Each structure stands twice: as C-alpha cells, then as structure tokens.
Image: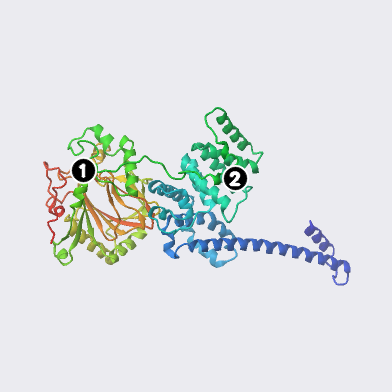
Amino acid sequence: MLLLWLLTFLYLTVSGEVFSSYENVRNINKIEDHLVQLLSDYISEDRERLDTLERFHQYVIKSKNYTDPGESYIKYPTNQFNVIHRFVADWKNLEAWTSSRNEAIASAFNTYRQYFPDQNDVDGAITAIHRLQDIYKIRASHFSRGDPISSVEGSEVRGQPFNEKALLLFIKDAYKKEEWLRCAGWGQQAFQQLQTGKEYDPPTSSLWFDISDHFAYCLYKAGDLQHAVEVTAEMLVHYPKHKRLIGNMKHFNDLVKKGEVKLDPSKSKRSVISEPLINLGEVQDEDVEITFIPKLYPGADKVVLTEKQIYEDVQDKDNKNWGLRIQKYKKLCKEEPSLTPKIKRQVERLTCYYKQDTPRSYLKPIKVEVAWPSPRILLFHDLITDEEADALISIAQPRLDRATVHNKKTGMLENAHYRVSKTAWLDNDLPEDKEGIVRRVNRRMEDATELSHDYAELQQINNYGMGGQYEPHYDMATLHDMKVQKRKQSAEGNRIATLLVYLREPEAGGATIFTDSGVRLLSRKNAAAFWYNLLPNGDPDLITRHAGCPVLAGTKWVMNKWFHANDQVFTRPCDLEELRREKDSKLYNGQYTI
C-alpha cells in the first residue's frame, strides 16, 4: 500500500524539482525508508537462508567425521542410508537455494543430477536395514546409535547415528507392513531421542506428534497396552481436543473395563522413558538348531522322483519346507552351526595340500583346502592376485546391472527381493589388455578344477552392497526346473560345478552358506570355493542348495564360474551305479599332496 501511494505521488510530481520543496524531500525520505525496509527484509531472508545452508554444511561435515573421509565412510550401513537419505531429503531442496546464486554449484548439480538417488533408493535402503536387523538380530537402538556392527562383533562405534526424521521413515515402513514389534522398537528409539536429545523437539512440533502417534499405535498392536496408554496420555496433555487421540484412549479404557487387558496402577502417569521396553526392535524367531542334514527328504538321491515330490520338496518356495529353510539361513548367517559327532569327526580329518599336475601349477602350486566333507567343498587359496582382483572389478564396474532370477512360474528373468546385488558378464568383446587378464584367470581356474573351459559360461561378477544377499538357491537346473517348469536342457548340459572366487571380502557379514548341509564359509579375498552341483550319475545334488548372507558392512565382490557337464567326460566320467559324493575324482581325495 505504501509502495502504491509513493508511486502515485511520484507520478503527480515527476516533472518538479525535489530540492526546492520540503514536501518533495519529505516524500523521497519515505521512499528511502521503504527501500531500507525491503533491503532489511532481503538481508534477513538471505541470512536465514545462509544460516540454514551453514547448519546443513556443518551437519554433513560432522557426519563425515564419524569415520575416515572418502570411501571408508560408506562402509557402514547407517552411513550408507544417511547419504542416500540426504540426497533425497536435503540436497535436492538446497539446489533451489544455491544454484541461481552460484554458477559452480549450478554446474555441479546439472552434471551430477543423473546420479542422484530417489525415493525408491530410500525405500530399498530401509528394507536392507530391516533385513540386517532381522538376520543378525540387531536392535533398533544399535542402528540408531550408528553401531550395528559392534552389537555383533563387540567393536567400537563406526557409523553415524540416525536422527529422528530418519527413524520416522523406519517406523512408517514397519507400520505399513504391519510389523508391529519392529515398529514399536524403532518408535521407542525415536521417542527417547525426542525427549533426551540435544536438539529437543517440542511436543507441539509435527515431528513429535507423528512419532508419538505411530509409536502408541504400534505398542498397542504389539500387545503392550500399558505403554500405549502412557504415550497416548502424554500426547493428550499437549493435544487435549484431538478427536482421534480421545477416541484411542476411550478404546483402551474399554478394553480394560472388559477385562481383556489389565493395567498396573503403579506405572500410571509416568513417562514411558522411565519404564524401558524389553526386546522391542529385536525380531523374535523360533530357535532353530542347525545340525548336519544329509538330505532334504528320504530318498532325495533317487534317480526317479514323483511329480509331487518334485513340486513340493525340491524347489517350490510355497511348500512347508521353505519357512524352516529360511530360519536355517538366518541362523547360519549369524553364527557357526552345531555339528553332530559324526560330522565333527569328519571335519577334524579334513586336509590341506598342494596341487601340482600341470606345468603352470608345478611352477606355482595351487593351495587346496578341503573345507567340507559332504557336499565336498574345496577352497583354492590365493587362486588370483590382488592386481587381478582389482582389474576384474574395474572391468565389471561400468557393466553392472541389477541381478535377475528366473521366475518359477513364467521362466522369465526378473528382479527379486531374495537376490539383491548387481552383476556384470565379462563377454568376449573386451580390449586386448583386459581380455588377457580374463584368459590368464581362466587358465588358472582350469588348472585348479581340472574342468574344461570350452563349455563353461562367461565369468559373472557380482557386487553386493548394503544388505545385499542371495537367499537359498541351486546353481544347476533341478528336476523341478526341467519337469514342472519344462525348462529345456542346454546343448552344453547342466551346470556340473561352481567356482566362486572372492574378489573383495566385506568387513562384516556376507558369508556363503549351504542350508541343507549346515556349511558356513566366510569370504576370503582371492580364494575360490569349488563344489560339484551334479552327482556322478548326472543327477542334481540336492544338498548343494546355498545362499549369500546379507552384507553388514563394506562391500562384497565375487566372481562366479559355472562349468557345464558336456565336454567333461574324461575329467569326471558318468557313473550310473555310484551315487556317493565321496567317490569323485583324485582332486577330492587329495592325491596331489606333496
């Protein structure tokens, strides 16, 4: 209004002198007062903007100080989540505040925007954190403090804590999936941080209400009405006319009156903080005793199976065995299995030896460790060098794409929650220098396994990140695949054997396990695990079902080499009568010991 009046006045006196009239000077003085006010407002807004930028800048700098700068920072899952979340929640918003005022920042945003994560990445990271929490039995409080690894290994805190806004995302994800115990665990941690944190969020803030509201409901659904009432009562102190809160409290009181739930009067009118919750945030699974299981079901090694056995017992995830198998998977990922006395005696007799049967291996013997008796698993130590591992990773990096699996109903390739990694195939179109590295590694793998490379698949390199896993699966085509899915056998034959090379080992997690035989192999850089997927008579060996456990910290790089049955007739001749795994080849019997 003042600006309109000033413009009207200037229009009426535009042709007159200013200095000769007191009235004119008085009015330009008012104009200056207005301009000063506008400038003050602009400075205040700009100062607020700069203060916000400075707070965010210091927040990121402080976050990076939790660990060494650079790549070391993203070894830990809490840091990985925080950097993804910052890009989605903060950096995109800050672009609008800075890019128009700074050419360098604007150019950087234009260059990097294509690499920015989006909400799908945040959702995937939340799922990964929940997977780690589930598999390794890590409480929400450990993640929130930034030390999930120390809860497993007893080491020092190495990650950045979660703030309340991040915790709310985990609460809402568990709420949406109706995982009430998990939701209450994250809610408890967020509620405690709200009330005890250095940057206190008042109860009138939307963040305080959102966290408390979800926390109270999840407590109720998790069966802890006592604390649900406490949290709801505390919310009603600050929101006494909130209809839904009043309705919730009425419902809780009705449950008490009906005798369905009893409250302890001694705990009334006390903050939930004073009464710590027990086991919230830790997933409760039945305790599964892992012992050696020679077969999935009686007669699993028979040549002929009925359609019912194939469909129900071999590889169908909807059958009764799948739940037990996943429990074994989780338990084996977290701890070493218990062994029966018979298997313990066999394990104690396992040996190591040097293999020297080719000109190359004679000059440089291959270190062989018999890692497990049945299925017979070998470890070839130092099969490749550090330089070769780094070279293979560098070749694979620009080729990485999300790993896929065969849909068991359609047979089509698709992404799946039970295989979370990125893969790259080292094809035949590599530059000469890089192809030379691949050929050299191939020759060494042939020397170690004695299997022909002619009918082998190209090397597949896998990179597992935060929570990356591959749940129990077979490498070969099973009778289920061939008869129920009617998958045709390739001209090269079935996958007779697997060689799994560890290019880079994670800092925590990422073990290779065999669920039906109770085997747990830790990743060992430059080593390779080897086993046969087929019995000597050519049938699938059903106790070779294996899995890659979720990566808890760091990154895991592995290379798969699958050898096919055709062209291996002289190395591993078919034996229609002999089904025993122990009678395989001199490679397994350690006849190369010197």
Q: Is residue 576 left or right of residue 101?
A: left
The chosen color scheme is rainbow
Q: Which residue is mark 1?
A: 540
Counting from the top left corner in percent of width and height, residue 158 is at 44, 59
Quarter of the picture containing the C terminus is bottom left
Examine the rendering and report whether any part of residue 309 can be seen. Answer: yes
Which secondary structure lies at badge 1?
Answer: loop
Q: Which residue is mark 2?
A: 209
Which secondary structure lies at badge 2?
Answer: helix
- Outermost residue to the top: 258
- Outermost residue to the front: 266
Q: Is residue 405 left or right of residue 590?
A: right
- In front: 306, or 174? 174
Q: Mark 1 or 2, which is nearer the eye?
A: 2
* Residue appearing at x 43%, y 53% in the figure: 148
* Residue appearing at x 22%, y 32% in the figure: 306
Image: 15 above or below 310: below
